[in-house]
Image (tube, helix red, strand yellow):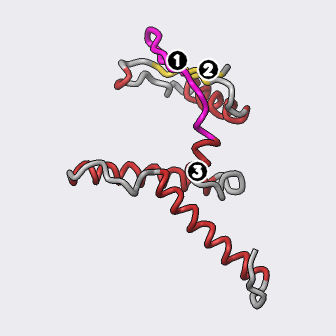
Amino acid sequence: MTNDYESSEVQILNEKSWRWRIENFFKDFDFLGLDALPSIELNKIAAMIALKLFAFNLMACLKRDTEDEFEKLTVESLFEEIIAFPALVKAKGNRIVVTFYGNYKEKHRVAVETLLGILDESGRNLPVSWLGNRKIVVRFK
């Protein structure tokens, strides 16, 4: 909505679209915690900023690559849409079993199972050294 009666509809849409992106940037900035420093130590600050910028850029690429589906979401909304559903993680022998419960979408289950299937078939689903050389197994219930 606007009280600008002089501009054309296209001009107004372009301007509002640009403003919306700016608003989302500030929401993303707050969600990623870029407004709070972890310490007064320069190395900790540099590491935090590098990790936060990596996360921000990763989410920006995801939003860009999925086009209409996630393009207009903030990072927080994207997190809630894709990642924020309950899971139980257990170490069982030589495996780490991650079991997702309930709130996930079917397309998420299909995407994860397809990816893990490709990794298994190509022999690239390797044990993770920093998890005690265990393999990650994902289940959905």
Which label's residue is closer to the chain start, 1 or 2? 1
Q: Amino acid at mark 2?
A: Arg
Q: Which residue is the site of mark 2?
A: 139
Q: Nearer the viewer, residue 40 or 57?
A: 40
Provide residue 129's location: percent of width, then percent of height.
Answer: 35, 24
Q: Amino acid at mark 1?
A: Val
In the image, residue 69 sits, relative to residue 13, either above or below, namely above
The segment highlighted magenta reads 82-98
* Residue 81, quarter of the rendered image: top right
Provide residue 8's location: percent of width, then percent of height.
Answer: 78, 85
Q: Residue at x 69, y 31 (%)?
A: 110
Q: Amino acid at mark 3?
A: Leu
Q: Which mark is residue 62?
A: 3
Indicate yes or no whether the magenta region holds residue 45: no
Q: Residues within 10 Å of mark 3 (few under 14, many from 20)?
A: some
Marks 1 and 2 sit apart, C-alpha to C-alpha, by: 7 Å
Q: Are marks 1 and 2 in contact (CB under 8 Å)?
A: yes
